[in-house]
Amino acid sequence: MIHFTGRLGFNQYIPSKRAQYGVKLYKLCERATGYTHKFRVYEGKDQSLEWVGCPDYLGSSEKTVWNLVSPLFSKGYHLYVENFYTSVPLFRHLFLEQISCCGTARPSDRGFPQRLVTTRLARGERAALCNEELLAVKWRDKRDVYMHSSIHADTTIQIERATSVIEKPLSVHDYNLLMGGVDFTDQMLAPYLLSRQTRRWYKKVSVYLIQLAMYNTFVLYSKAGRTGSFLKFQEEIIENLLYPGGSVVPNPSVVSRLHERHFPSVVAGTLTQPPP
C-alpha cells in the first residue's frame, strides 16, 4: 500500500495495513533478496483483466497472479502466496505451465476438501488428501492450518521447541520459510521512503517506483560481487547524478554562493524626529 488519502476512484481501505488508505500494488518478489520481478497497480474492481492464455472463469485475484507470473512460464519456479490468492483452478493451470505453487487456504475455499474440514484433530496431528499434482493439508497447531500445494508430498519435518519436538508438515515449514518477499522489500525501503503529502496520487506512486527501481539495481549490483550497504549505494547514485563525469564534490567552504552577498550585513540606523 502506498499511503494516499486524497480523492481517487481506485483508492483502497485495508484496516490491517499500517497505511490504511492508499494505492494498492500487486508485486511478485524474490524471497531471498526482495527483488521485484513484476508489479501491477490495482485499478478498481471494474478493471478489464484479459490476459493471453488465461482461462476466462478465473477470478480477478487469480488473473492478477497469472499476469505477474506469466513471464516465468516453463522455467520451473516455485510460487508462494497467501490465502487471498490460493485457488485450486489457478494452481492446476500454473502447474501445467511449470509453475508449482504453495499457499495457505481457507476452509470455505472453492475446491478445498470438506472431508478435511470436518476432521477433528488433536494438537500436532495432521490430515492430508492428494489429487493428482495437488495436495491439501490440515494441521492442528494452536489452531487449524489449511494448506494447498503442488510442490510438496505428504511429508513432515521435526521441529524442536523449548519443551518438545513436533512433527510439522513440510508444506507449512517451507511456506513460513519462503513466504514474505514483498514484506522483505518493504522493510528494505521503509527507512528511505521519500513520499510527502500531495494531492496528486501519481507523484507518490512515481517516487515509490523510482526507489523500487533503485533497490532492484542494488540487488543486481550485489549479485555481481560488489559490497556495501543500500544506504551507501544510494549516496553514490545521488552523487553521480549531481556531479556527472566523476568530478570531485566541491568543498562547501569554497562554493561561490556562500560568499559575500549571501551573508547578512548590518543596516545603518536612521535618524528620527522626537515626537512633539
Image: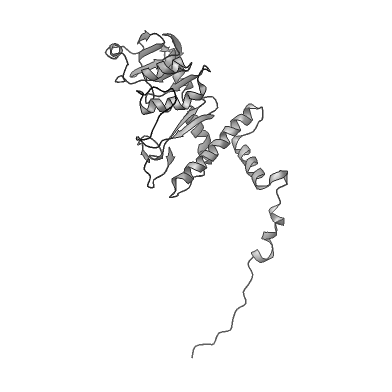
16 over 6 or under it: above or below:
above
Residue 176: percent from left, percent from top: 45, 21
Seen at 49% across and 34% down, the residue is 186
Task: Compare residues 205 and 230 and report the one nearer the observer.
Answer: 205
Task: Compare residues 92 and 244 and report the one nearer the observer.
Answer: 92
Q: Quadrant of residue 235?
A: top right
238 over 223 or under it: above or below:
below
82 over 153 or under it: above or below:
below
Seen at 41% across and 10% down, the residue is 133
Residue 99: percent from left, percent from top: 47, 18
Residue 129: percent from left, percent from top: 35, 9
Is there any visible trace of residue 231 in the rendered image?
A: yes
Which quadrant, please, contains the N terminus?
Answer: top left
Q: Quadrant of residue 168?
A: top left
Q: Quadrant of residue 104?
A: top left
161 over 202 or under it: above or below:
above
Task: Compare residues 208 and 91 and report the one nearer the observer.
Answer: 91
Query: What colouring style does the render use?
Result: one colour
Seen at 44% across and 18% down, the residue is 94
Residue farthest left in this picture: 118
